[in-house]
Amino acid sequence: MKKSKLAFCLAILLAVVNIFCVRAADIQYIKNLNASATTVYFNLENGTETTGDRLWTISFNRTSIEANTGTSIQVVDQSFEQLIAAPKAGYEAALEKGSGKSWYEYDMLSHSITPLTQKTIVVKLPSGKYAKIEIQNYYKDGKGDSGYYTFRYEFIK
């Protein structure tokens, strides 16, 4: 009897770990995307930096994030983990700029940009897909020069 309970508990544990691993595998991580001096174009569908004349989804330039033609974008007041389904309305061509109005807060004393953990960017692609993005850091390797985006994203319904 004890062996069957142990086997059952082990099976449940493995199932939970498997679900978590599959979910984590769907999240893409991008580190140090350099938008410090020029506009950088990024394709969410294939997870690569590209040029402005190629297929791109969003662009980054310093603290500005804009959507390509046919793509739209917005910031929602939910954490990356909390956001399960994309909003159907409220999308724009670019994110509003300014401390606290978008994905970041600007500290006037330290002159630093801090991503807001309770804000998630949602992108609506021309294909009808939605992606959620969490900006995790704005500094190279988390402490260096500004304008280097570290973020994670995942496609959602």
Image: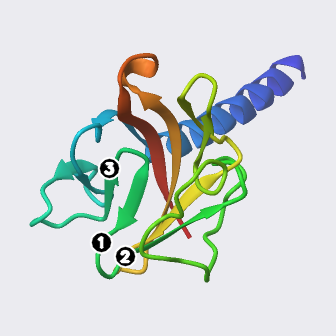
Q: Give the side of residue 43 with respect to residue 18, left or right.
A: left
Local crowd size for mark 2, using a 10 Å CA cut-off: few (<14), some (14–19), many (≥20): many
* Residue 76 visible within the image: yes
Looking at the rendered image, the quarter that the C terminus falls into is: bottom right
Dividing the picture into quadrants, the one containing residue 108 is top right
User: Disc 2 or disc 3, which is closer to the eye?
Assistant: 3
Q: Position of residue 143 (x, y in %)?
A: 45, 16
Give the residue at x 23% y 51%: 39
Q: Residue 64, relative to residue 85: is it above or below?
A: above
Q: Label 2 to label 1, Cα distance in Å? A: 5 Å
Q: Which residue is mark 3?
A: 61
Q: Label 1 to label 3, Cα distance in Å? A: 13 Å
The label number, if any, that marks residue 49 in the structure image: none
Give the residue at x 46% y 20%: 142
Nearest the viewer among 33 and 145 is: 145
The number of discs equals 3
Mark 1: amino acid:
Asn
- State the SS at label 2: loop
Q: Position of residue 42 (x, y in %)?
A: 27, 54
Local crowd size for mark 1, using a 10 Å CA cut-off: few (<14), some (14–19), many (≥20): many
Dividing the picture into quadrants, the one containing residue 90 is bottom right
Mark 2: amino acid:
Thr
Q: Position of residue 149 (x, y in %)?
A: 39, 37
Q: Which residue is mark 1?
A: 68
Q: Residue 70, relative to residue 102: is it above or below?
A: below
Q: Position of residue 82 (x, y in %)?
A: 72, 52
Nearest the viewer among 22 and 108 is: 108
Looking at the rendered image, the quarter that the N terminus falls into is: top right
The label number, if any, that marks residue 71 in the structure image: 2
